[in-house]
Image: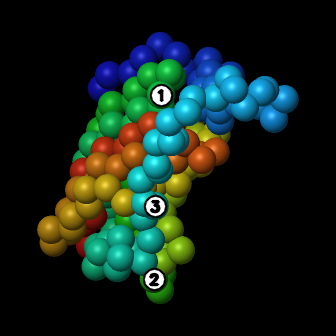
Amino acid sequence: MTRTPLRRTWPAALALAVAALAGCTAGEAESTRPSSSPVPLPPLAGASEAATVAGLPDGPASGTVVLTYSGLGELRSPLTGTCTSEGDRTVVAAEAGGASVVLTFDPAGAEVAVRDVGLETTSSVAAGDLAVEGAVLHLAADLVAAGQVVGTLVMDATCSG
């Protein structure tokens, strides 16, 4: 398991990163903004991704996760937890390196909630590389918050039914 030593500074650093990524304030003159078009956001996960993961069996989950937030650091760890589904909603709830990571898919979108010492954050998951092979979930996607890409999530999890 590799983890940056920024554990207790995540909340303040996340707030600063989101504020910095949010762009110009209303009080700034238009002339200070770049003349080029803003970088478009990746499309967010939705009904197609929810349908892809719907076949995962309920039961224990194990695997690996790499969670990166821009300017904050990275959590790279084995994960253990559970896979559950109810209707068209699928959840992988796991512990990874002492942090709680909950990945939720439903037709309206996907999100990842992370809770660690001094950190609680939820980000939307972009439509990225997603595959389900039997009981194995493979995901590599950008994370979006406050209208900006704020990080990435890579998860390989086996859901044992």
Residue at the location (68% across, 23% down)? 32
Rounded to the nearest angstrom, the CA distance separating label 1 from label 3 is 18 Å
Relative horizontal placement of residue 34, taking residue 54 as reference (left or right): right
Q: Amino acid at mark 1?
A: Ser
Element type at mark 2: loop
Residue 81 place in picture, x, y as percent: 39, 54
Q: Is residue 154 above or below residue 137?
A: above
Quarter containing the C terminus: bottom left
Q: Mark 3–mark 2 contact, CB under 8 Å? A: no
Relative horizontal placement of residue 124, taking residue 134 as reference (left or right): right
Residue at the location (50% across, 68% down)? 109
Sequence-first disc among 3 and 2: 3
- Report the residue marked by disc 3: 44
Query: Can residue 28 be spotted in the picture?
Result: yes
Q: Is residue 139 above or below residue 143?
A: below
**Label 1: few (<14), some (14–19) or many (≥20) C-alpha neighbours in 10 Å:** some
Task: Say which of 70 and 161 sits in front.
Answer: 70
Q: Amino acid at mark 2?
A: Asp
